[in-house]
Image (cartoon, rainbow, N blue to C red):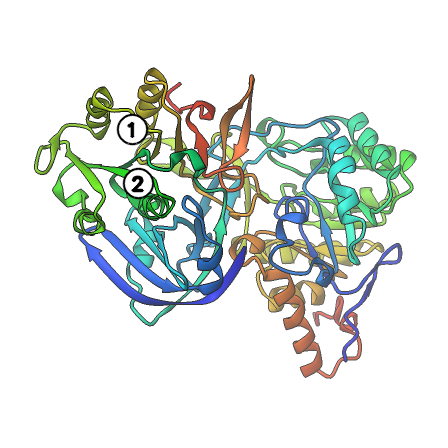
Amino acid sequence: MFQDKNARITETRNWGNYFLLRMSAPQIAREARPGQFLMIRVSSSLNPLLRRPLSIHNCTATEIEIFFQVTGEGTRLLSKKNTGEELDVMGPCGCGFSLKPEFKDREIFCVGGGRGLAPLFFLARELQAAGARPVIFYGGQTLSDLPLKNRLEEAGWEINFSTDDGSYGFTGLVTQLVEQELRKRKPAFLFGCGPEGMMARLADICQLSNLGAEFSLESIMGCGLGACWGCVRKIKKGSEIKYHRICQDGPVFQAEEIVWSGD
Amino acid sequence: MVDLSVDLGFLKLKNPVIAASGTFGYGLEFEPLYDLNLLGGLVVKGLYFKPREGNRPPRLAETPCGLINSIGLQGIGVEAFCREILPRLAGLQTAVIANVCGEEEEEYARVAEYLSRHRGLAALELNISCPNVREGGMCPAQDPEATYRTVKRVKQVSSLPLITKLSPNVTDITAVALAAEEAGSQAVSLVNTFLALALDLESRKPKLGNVLGGLSGPAIKPLALRMVFEVARKVKIPVIGLGGIFSSQDALEFMVAGASAVEVGTANFVNPLACPEIIKGMEDWAESQGLNRLSEIVGSLKV
């Protein structure tokens, strides 16, 4: 865990409401694992007060990338940052996705809804490096919700797109597309991140298919360090359901552990 | 070299900056980021006797320059704390202070008595002021008599020095501070959070699962400073000031208003290095003022 107060932005990209920032943060980059996140100060003023938790989207030897959608004041301020500016970044926070040796030579479904694709790019790269075959599912309401389309295609993985309105790829929900594929083949595991309803539905699908899965959850956070207990969520461990900290015990949890908000 | 140390009478701190309860976990959470021995002290998260689940999420709502929380003191309980955490804190060269909670008077006493039997604690902070535990934010610190009874009861069972943490959600905080002093508390710390509400206009629902919460952060600093000033003029025991301290200037202002030491809370979230940076800033300022001892400024407000 490091605090880098001078993470210099080296590249910014923008597609409508979606943004990508690349920054130099060598200590954090060295330790980062897929599924971990950063706590980023979006302004040097005290309003807004709290840091914002953002998934690590990509990571090189010295640089990290975040990919986000503007959803409020914090992300709006972050979207205004330019190349050359410095950010105060703490990380890598939390526990990442579980990469298991038995994934080697097997297909691994990586399912992202909208901005939920953020942590899956880094994950897919690491899966590939470990000899697994990532299969990406990327869903959105319409084509403009799939801004990472080209970037994913360039990476050379198998990618399955879906849009609710049929403007690109499969017409319908990404969960329906996953269900359709699961009738044809059996991956070794599924990783997902996206809207709560999407993940809850995927958890059901995985349970019916007897497929192991992990999901990355989102929450407003106070500290990102496990100190404030502000970001809790009900998690089942064995027969016991308790509040666990998303920042410290997560943000990635096993599908069967998560108590979905609709339950 | 300026002498930063603080003598509270019952406890000597190497500097006046203490990490505040509820914002610093059990202390160890911040260990990866800096050497905890830099701190004047740290107060661990509130401890009930048994583990506690805390309040329904959402537990945090951000407001302009502020944060409303309704954690509800989720925690591991005093037994697990003494077994798993305290031995790891005991080797620190900083004052480790346990924050004592209770559903009723007897639980405060049980927790304090249990903690007193263990080594490694410099003092207890009596948390009679959490607004998130009972309906409508009620707590013993809203009533001088209940404060007196609770402090008195805890003093009967514990020989550790006692700091009583006061609530700002009262008409006259000095009356409560005097009650704590009369009952034998060796210091008071103030203020805990201000009972507050944030709501979503669109859905007309409260932003917090527990409806009400406690407001902290820079938004409350002038209110907290006023209360520290009022209390410090009335009591003879040391006052530990807290409430929205984010910078060394804030911390120094609390000392000038009458605080012998300060606690830093919400700032730990925004800047995890807040405490060591505030200590450094206070030292630099004292040097620039030509002070020999920083504590010379305590209560030096010219009115």
Residue position for label 1: A198
**Residue B273, quarter of picture:** bottom right
Q: Is residue B235 above or below residue B149?
A: below
Q: Using the image, determine if residue B275 lies above or below residue A56.
A: below
Measured from the top left, where is residue A29 in percent x and y?
44, 58
Subunit that carries the residue with mark 2:
A
Instruction: Residue A137: tell me if it is visible.
Output: yes
**Quadrant where the C terminus of chain B lies?**
bottom right
Which residue is situated farthest in the left direction here? A167
Spatial separation of the CA atoms under disc 1 and disc 2: 10 Å
What is the number of the mark on residue B299? none
**Disc 1 or 2, which lies upstream in sequence?**
2
Instruction: Spot the residue most to the front.
Output: A105
Check disc 1 and report its element: helix, strand or loop.
helix
Instruction: Say which of A174 and A160 sits in front.
Output: A160
**At label 1, which amino acid type do we have?**
Met
Q: Nearer the viewer, residue A70 or A106?
A: A106
Q: Amino acid at mark 2?
A: Gly
Label 1 environment density (alpha carbons within 10 Å; few <14, some 14–19, many ≥20): some
Rendering coords of residue A132 (x, y %): 34, 39
When asked about the image quadrant of residue B274, the answer is bottom right
Locate residue A97, reporting x and y percent. Answer: 43, 39
Quick check: marks 1 and 2 in contact, CB under 8 Å?
yes
Q: Which residue is mark 2?
A: A116
Point 57% across, 36% down: residue: B71
Q: Residues within 10 Å of mark 2 (few under 14, many from 20)?
A: many
The location of residue A79, given as percent across then percent down, is 29, 58
